[in-house]
Amino acid sequence: MRALVQRVAKASVAIQGSEVARIGNGLVLLIGIGNDDTDEDVRYITEKCVNLRIFPDTEGRFNLSALDVKGALLLVSQFTLYADTRKGRRPSFTSAAAPEKAAPLFERLAGQFRATGLDVQTGRFQEHMLVEIHNDGPVTLLIDSAERHLSRDGKEKKS
């Protein structure tokens, strides 16, 4: 599972000209779900995202998390985070989970984020959305749950 995390001053999602979600200060999480993702990935992404210390403290340092600042979250499903662009000019999305698998995992992810007590808004799964993001900083990070199995040097961790 991949989460492209953006710290925002505000963000919104519109579908067919109607706004369906809006947040103020917080995080936009563009979520890609892969073929091999499970509830373990849901837990990892939730824990990692809400505890990332990417909000400034009184000295301007990245010392506060979304939980600390009570930031809102806007989750948007984005299968294109699993694009494979190594060959040709058209991306392949064979590593992205099929909608039948991805939709329930996305809903469980949203539920896990809601269980943290933060305000959680979502886009709509498999809809064409216009996402307006006011990236604050800008601060943008990519989290890939598969990387939890790797050491900092990129090698597989020993058990």
Image: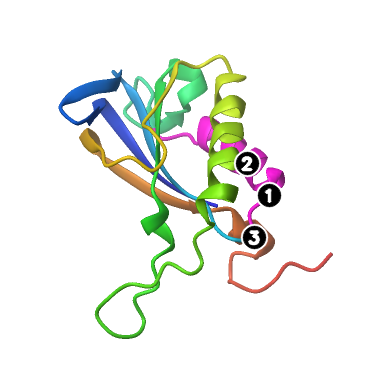
Helix, strand or loop for disc 3:
loop
Which of pointers 2 and 3 lies earlier in the amino acid sequence? 3
Residue 142: x percent and y percent?
Answer: 42, 52
Residue 27: x percent and y percent?
Answer: 37, 31
Q: Nearer the viewer, residue 34 or 6?
A: 34
Q: Residues within 10 Å of mark 3 (few under 14, many from 20)?
A: few
Which kind of residue does numbered mark 1 sit on? Thr
C-beta proximity under 8 Å, tags 3 and 1? yes
Q: Which residues are magenta?
A: 36-54
Residue 127 falls in image quadrant? top left
According to the image, label 2 marks what residue?
42
Horizontal placement of 138 versus 75: left or right?
left
- Give the answer, above or below, for where 152 lies relative to 119: below
Instruction: Measure how far apart labels 2 and 3 are at the Cα level.
Output: 12 Å
According to the image, label 1 marks what residue?
38
Instruction: Measure how far apart labels 3 and 1 are at the Cα level.
Output: 7 Å
Q: Residue at x 68, y 49 (%)?
A: 38
Residue 122: x percent and y percent?
Answer: 40, 28
Residue 106 falls in image quadrant? top right
- Tell me, for residue 36, which label it has, or none: 3
Which kind of residue does numbered mark 3 sit on? Asp
